[in-house]
Image (cartoon, rainbow, N blue to C red):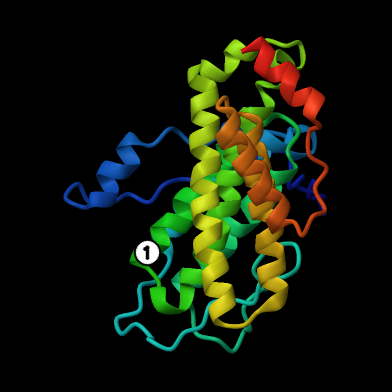
Amino acid sequence: MGTTKPLNPTAHFSAEDPEWPLESPFSAIAARRPPITHRMSLSNASPHELMVFAKDQFSRGIFHMPHPRHPQTHRQPPTITPGGAAAPPSIREPFSRAKELFTIASEVLLVAEKLEIPSERQCWASWADSVFNQMKMEADMDAWRGPITRARGRCWLVVGSSRAEELETALERGDMDVLQSEDAQDAREGLSTAISFFERAKGSATAVNDPAESHELQSLLAEALLNLANLTEDERKREELYARAQLESGGDLELPNAEDDDAMDESM
């Protein structure tokens, strides 16, 4: 008898797009999408390369998710674990497209928050936000509004903080002109968007009397306010943001001292 050489599951992977009819909108989408990620050895791939590979598969998988003909109006959002990810759905539950999208985006966001390179964190947090935003068309928003708003705030906190991190070197050497750059403006816009989402999510958590979630949202909001203050040129606005951050944190933040503020003002 001959022997069969075992397959190495990480050596090669390829997937083919279905052959959509020309009149199908999916045919136009597939034609404009980049080719399937090149074959790779998963054991040697960087986290970013693995995420690109996973995104390709998620994008194709989303096309194959069923759309229930009669949407269930009483479907509840998933339980959120302490790490921020959605708990896996019970096998007894009917398929929920909204829950699957939320789980995919939540897992991508968890990875994005841990990546070392700021530009990669921005990339994947933005992708996760696009999936959360898509859920407006998939979910009963009365039930999902709180979890989605909170998750999108985390996405924008990653985006804004990562952009701010790229400016830190210039700020540390006293180059305050960088605060007038387009990158600084993008960072401020990202952080302001995060603050808006957190404030809305905080209101929802208060309405349903969830102290644990309210506390976590206060911590996230304080972080966004502090980062925004550090990028704010106007002294009065900066101090207002510091005060708000300190309030949300319960007084636990270590804020810049007066000498640091004077040095920043003199350099502007």
Residue located farthest toward the left when viewing the structure as drawn = 23
The location of residue 206, given as percent across then percent down, is: 58, 76
Q: How many labels were placed on the picture? A: 1
Residue under the point 38% across and 86% down: 72
Q: Which residue is located at x 42 percent, y 33 percent? A: 34
Left or right of 94 on screen, residue 231: right
Q: Residue at x 74, y 56 (%)?
A: 249
Q: Is residue 163 above or below residue 248?
A: above
From the viewer's perspective, is 11 left or right of 3? left
Quadrant of the snapshot with the C terminus = top right
Q: Label 1 neighbourhood size at 10 Å, few (<14), some (14-19), many (20+)? A: some
Q: Quadrant of residue 169?
A: top right
Q: Which of the pair 41/76 is nearer the observer? A: 76
Amino acid type at image mark 1:
Lys
Q: Which quadrant does the N terminus fall into?
A: bottom right
In the depicted view, which residue is nearer to us: 260 or 87? Answer: 260
The x, y position of residue 235, in whole percent, is 60, 29
Asked if residue 198 lies left or right of residue 7, the reply is left
Residue lying at 64% horizontally and 38% vertically, measured from the top left: 239
Q: Nearer the viewer, residue 43 or 214?
A: 214
State which quadrant residue 158 falls in.
top right
| Image coords of residue 165 (percent x, y) | 69, 28
Name the foreground residue: 172 vs 6: 172
**Residue 102 at x, y = what percent?**
53, 64
Q: Is residue 158 visible?
A: no
Position of 266 with respect to 156 (left or right) is: right
Q: Quadrant of residue 231?
A: top right
Instruction: Indicate whether 252 appears above or below 12.
Output: below
Q: Is residue 235 visible?
A: yes
Query: Residue under circle 1?
Result: 136
Relative to 67, does residue 264 appear above or below in the rendering? above
